[in-house]
Image: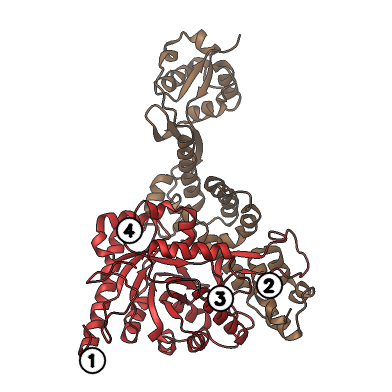
């Protein structure tokens, strides 16, 4: 288990009944973040590290990160028909054990897909192999997918000693075959299986832009009591829509969503994902960490007023 | 296979095979004809916003090139400023996907994208981008070449004092990586303004110049030199095979006919003294 710290830190348990610890505040790993932690280590409680990076470059962990690790993953393809190869699942399990991560975050998405004969146009992609998109894509939100995700989550969860959290993917287009909204899908999934959530606020906002709904109202419809971790990152606003952006600070709406989410959710960790650019200004990183901590402190003040049992 | 299970394979194919995406945009029904899908699903797939999928595919390509931008910050800023970033990556996707299985090293990926981007920018002509891109590419290429062969060497100035007759018979060879580019403006100043957020869309002030980006192996530093026309012409003719006499002849034929051959001597002497060229003994 990741060592618990009195203020911040990430643990696998919720502590004593009724008690609410302040969520730990961490950063998504990058080379910049590594050097930032060396200088400003006290402001960061943990590092979220992608499994795919550890798999490719174990030295990232072996050289010592100096902080507890939360494992993030984009390989399980939990919403897809193509199961993650068994050796990869085993590698994830081993890295979870080795890093002592309190959970494994994974995307509510598919990364791979079966190849179905559908005629040829030009040079086909990797003939004979399943499609590997190399990026997480939201699946069609319907009953069939729901059933598949519930099965896959249950199956994968049985392989790991720590819980699996599912992260809401951003919707960049209306996925054909969908019969429900992403929020409805997540609600139905939570009703079916005991899975925790990783709520990515920027993804939620991007989805609201694509699907044209009020993001604050939609947030209220999510099963926030299942949220264990929250992601905060930037959004690239373009004339053609909003896009995920880990190279810029989160817009005001994302911070507003965080404050609103903390009114109902009791996450154990909040991760700032500013890991796409080695030029991300360290002073902005410090400012963003402080801003998130202030938001957390305000929400806890409100909770203390409302509930004297909280610490 | 149940028809609903076709959605993910078709979406994956749209994201990974730009030719299929183009076929869908041209005639969705024809592109999907070979799939065993029912009419309802076909109608739904045909009604999907394919332009958004094209941009999403470009977005994936963009994310997969995140490491590129630390080397080309001003170019990236201008691509975004002119609203071309996603569009460029969507256009590039075809090349990226055809190359991704055999070009895995970072320098090759960067070179491939830049080879695409330069003509892409040249056609669209967004203000300032071509100049900044050429500048940042030259810096990157010279730095990369210096890293690839970091053989620092002692300065050998002996060639600068050779009698003119002997110098003419020598073969000048540029030491270290060198790129020479003409610019209509000062690209370094422009790039700095862009990175500092002080660029507001205007065409850069005209200030024609020729710059040499030189990896100086004696000092292990990248130097950016402003060249006069004579120097630029002579360096462009210096290929490591021609003698000084032949280089001067070629330069004079290409526009420097007014300059007498001896007018070139100070250039060769200075270039040898600063370590830019070495005068090899020619084969007689």
Disc 4 chain ID = A
Figure chain in red: A
Residue behind mark 1 = A306
Q: Quadrant of the C terminus of chain B?
A: top right
Identify which residue is drawn at 42% across, 13% down.
B158
Chain at numbered mark 2: B
Residue in front for this viewpoint, A216 or B132: A216
Give me the disc on residue B141. none
Within 10 Å of disc 1 (Cα), the crowding (few <14, some 14-19, many 20+) is few
- Can residue A25 be spotted in the picture? yes
Q: Which mark is nearer the camera, 3 or 4?
A: 3
**Which numbered mark, 4 or 2, is in the foreground of this view?**
2
Q: Distance from label 4 to label 2 (Cα)?
A: 40 Å
Real-space CA distance between mark 3 and mark 2, rounded to the nearest whole angstrom: 13 Å
Q: Give the labeled residue for mark 2.
A: B10
Is B182 situated above or below B21? above
The answer for how far apart the CA atoms under marks 1 and 3 are is 38 Å
Q: Which residue corresponds to the image point at 22% horizontal and 71% vertical from the top-left?
A: A6
């Amino acid at each position: 288990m990741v060592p618990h710290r009195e203020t911040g830190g990430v643990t696998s348990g919720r502590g004593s009944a009724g008690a609410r610890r302040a969520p730990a505040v961490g950063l998504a790993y990058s080379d910049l973040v590594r050097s930032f932690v060396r200088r400003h280590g006290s402001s960061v409680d943990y590092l979220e590290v992608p499994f795919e990076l550890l798999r490719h470059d174990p030295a990232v962990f072996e050289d010592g990160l100096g902080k507890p690790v939360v494992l993030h993953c984009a390989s399980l393809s939990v919403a897809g028909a193509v199961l993650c190869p068994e050796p990869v699942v085993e590698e994830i399990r081993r890295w979870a054990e080795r890093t002592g991560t309190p959970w494994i975050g994974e995307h509510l998405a598919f990364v791979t897909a079966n190849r179905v004969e559908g005629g040829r146009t030009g040079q086909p992609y990797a003939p004979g192999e399943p499609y590997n998109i190399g990026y997480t894509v939201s699946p069609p939100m319907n009953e069939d997918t729901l059933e598949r995700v519930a099965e896959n989550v249950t199956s994968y969860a049985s392989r790991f000693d720590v819980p699996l959290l599912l992260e809401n993917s951003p919707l960049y287009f209306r996925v054909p075959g969908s019969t429900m909204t992403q929020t409805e899908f997540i609600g139905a999934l939570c009703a079916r299986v005991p899975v925790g959530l990783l709520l990515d606020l920027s993804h939620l906002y991007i989805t609201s832009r694509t699907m044209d709904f009020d993001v604050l109202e939609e947030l209220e419809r999510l099963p926030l009591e299942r949220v264990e971790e929250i992601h905060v990152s930037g959004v690239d606003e373009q004339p053609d829509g909003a896009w995920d952006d880990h190279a810029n600070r989160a817009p005001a709406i994302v911070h507003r969503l965080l404050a609103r989410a903390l009114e109902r959710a009791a996450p154990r960790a909040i991760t700032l994902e500013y890991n796409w650019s080695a030029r991300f200004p360290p002073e902005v990183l410090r400012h963003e960490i402080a801003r998130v901590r202030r938001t957390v402190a305000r929400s806890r003040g409100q909770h203390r007023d409302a509930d004297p049992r909280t610490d | 296979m149940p028809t609903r299970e076709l959605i993910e394979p078709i979406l994956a194919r749209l994201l990974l095979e730009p030719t299929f995406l183009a076929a869908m945009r041209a005639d969705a029904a024809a592109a999907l004809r070979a799939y065993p899908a029912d009419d309802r699903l076909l109608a739904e797939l045909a009604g999907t916003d394919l332009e958004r999928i094209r941009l999403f595919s470009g977005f994936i390509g963009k994310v997969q090139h995140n490491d590129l931008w630390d080397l080309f910050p001003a170019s990236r800023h201008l691509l975004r400023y002119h609203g071309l970033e996603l569009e460029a990556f969507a256009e590039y996707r075809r090349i990226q996907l055809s190359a991704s299985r055999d070009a895995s090293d970072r320098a090759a990926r960067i070179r491939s994208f830049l080879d695409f981007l330069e003509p892409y920018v040249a056609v669209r002509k967004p203000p300032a981008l071509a100049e900044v891109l050429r500048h940042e590419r030259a810096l990157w290429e010279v730095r990369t070449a210096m890293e690839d062969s970091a053989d620092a060497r002692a300065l050998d100035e002996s060639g600068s004092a050779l009698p003119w007759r002997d110098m003419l018979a020598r073969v000048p060879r540029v030491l270290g990586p060198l790129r020479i580019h003409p610019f209509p403006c000062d690209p370094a100043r422009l790039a700095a303004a862009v990175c500092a957020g002080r660029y507001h869309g205007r065409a850069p002030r005209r200030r024609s110049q020729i710059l040499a980006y030189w990896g100086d192996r004696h000092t292990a530093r990248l130097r950016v030199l402003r060249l006069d026309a004579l120097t630029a012409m002579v360096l462009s003719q210096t290929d490591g095979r021609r003698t000084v006499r032949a280089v001067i002849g070629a330069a004079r034929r290409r526009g420097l006919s007014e300059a007498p051959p001896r007018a070139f001597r100070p250039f060769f002497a200075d270039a040898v003294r600063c370590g830019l060229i070495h005068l090899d003994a020619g084969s007689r």
